[in-house]
Image (cartoon, coloured by chain):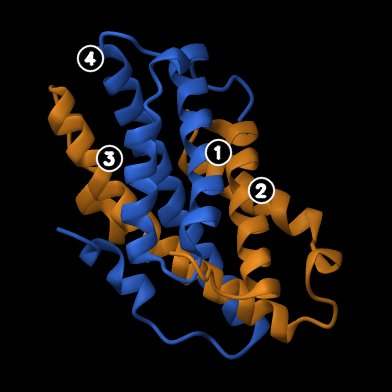
Chain colours: A blue, B orange
Amino acid sequence: MTDQPVAALTARPLPASLPEARAAIDEVDTALAALLEYRAGLTEQVQQLKPVGGRAGRDPDREAEIVAGMARQAPRLGRERLRRIMTAVIEESLDLAERGAATTR
Amino acid sequence: MTDQPVAALTARPLPASLPEARAAIDEVDTALAALLEYRAGLTEQVQQLKPVGGRAGRDPDREAEIVAGMARQAPRLGRERLRRIMTAVIEESLDLAERGAATTR
């Protein structure tokens, strides 16, 4: 499946005006929101299936492997920036798994 | 276009085993990497088109609007968690716009 699901968004040339660029960011963020919500559900699933869950069960090797794989797909952002982004994604997903859904939306 | 590009990924039921859940996370992360790289390019574009760019040109109202829109799509993660994730995404994208592509991948 690789990156085909998002190619409709990412294969387009960069827009030339500020309003078009912002509209393109909004489209990307709509897709990001759907992916992050689904990924958070997967994290909850993993927490239930793992022998040691939560922050204590975090696996630095697995996280480094995730980031390295993403850096091959996103070489301009690169490993360090992706590591910082994915740390936020993983921490917030674990927070949801531990504390449950937000009460204020 | 909304979230259709990623529906092939996110409309699936949650997997029942740890290896399947991790494989699904890897597929999501492949799509995330492509979207984040494209979004970073859009951020660079916006930086060039805006009168005041960089961190000084950050617009808290626009960022809050982005997060609010995403929270409607991802209500379980919710606004506060998405705000922390998107702060990382925006800061790393601005870092790329200012300092250029990573030299170590």
For residue B25, the mark is 3
Residue receiving disc 4:
A49
From the viewer's perspective, is the residue at label 1 or at label 2 nearer?
1
Give the residue type at disc 4. Answer: Leu
Q: In terms of image quadrants, where is residue B97? A: bottom right
For residue A88, the mark is 1
Q: Quadrant of the N terminus of chain A?
A: bottom left
Q: Are marks 4 and 3 in contact (CB under 8 Å)?
A: no
* Secondary-structure class at tag 3: helix
Read off the chain for label 2: B
Q: Please check whether the numbered discs 3 and 1 fall on a single chain.
A: no
* Secondary-structure class at tag 2: helix
Give the residue type at disc 1. Answer: Ala
Give the residue type at disc 3. Answer: Ile
Q: Please check whether the numbered discs 1 and 2 fall on a single chain.
A: no
Picture coordinates of residue A26, whole percent (x, y): 54, 63
For residue B87, the mark is 2
Closer to the camera, A75 or B21? A75
| Residue A67 visible in the shown view | yes
> How far apart, in angstroms, are the residues tagged by discs 4 and 3?
14 Å
